[in-house]
Image (spheres, rainbow, N blue to C red):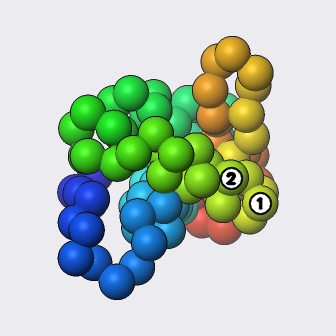
Amino acid sequence: MAVTNDPGEPVPAHRRLAAMLREEIVHGRIEPDRPLPPEELLVREHGFAPEDVRRAVEVLSGEGLVYTVEGQGAYVSTRAEETGGG
């Protein structure tokens, strides 16, 4: 994953992160029922704010690409297989 949080970028941070994660999912680099990288990792390694990570997961959830398990995080949906992932 090569996206970082550049404040000068015109696309909102959560949209850039969602696009990065979507690409990982669609290309099968994160398989169905496997977890997304933890929020802490995305914050620490890529410089995103925790709120941006949560909003990115909401975007992907709205697209049906991920689902969340309370207290455990977000996982790739089996729907990702239909869009080319997995």
SS of the residue at dot 2? helix
Asked whether the viewer can see residue 69, the reply is yes
Q: Is residue 28 above or below residue 10?
A: above
As rendered, which of 51 and 34 lies closer to the eye? 51
Label 2 crowd bin: few (<14), some (14–19), many (20+), radius 10 Å: some
Q: Left or right of 76: which side holds 36?
A: left
Q: Do the residues labelled 1 and 2 touch (CB within 8 Å)?
A: yes
**Image location of residue 47, percent across then percent down:** 26, 46
Task: Rate crowding at label 1 as few (under 14), some (14 to 19) or many (20 or more) other CA atoms within 10 Å.
Answer: few
| Three-letter code for the amino acid on which mark 2 is drawn | Glu
- Identify the residue at horizontal 49%, vertical 68% (top origin): 15
- Dot 1 corresponds to which residue? 62
Q: Distance between the residues labelled 1 and 2?
A: 6 Å
Residue sticking out furthest to the bottom: 10
- Residue type of the residue flagged with mark 1: Gly
Q: Can residue 19 be seen in this view?
A: no
Residue 85 lies, in percent from the top left, at 57, 57
| In this rendering, position of residue 5 left or right of residue 35 | left
Which quarter of the figure has residue 60?
bottom right
Q: What residue would you read off at disc 2?
A: 58
Residue 3 placement, left or right of 34? left
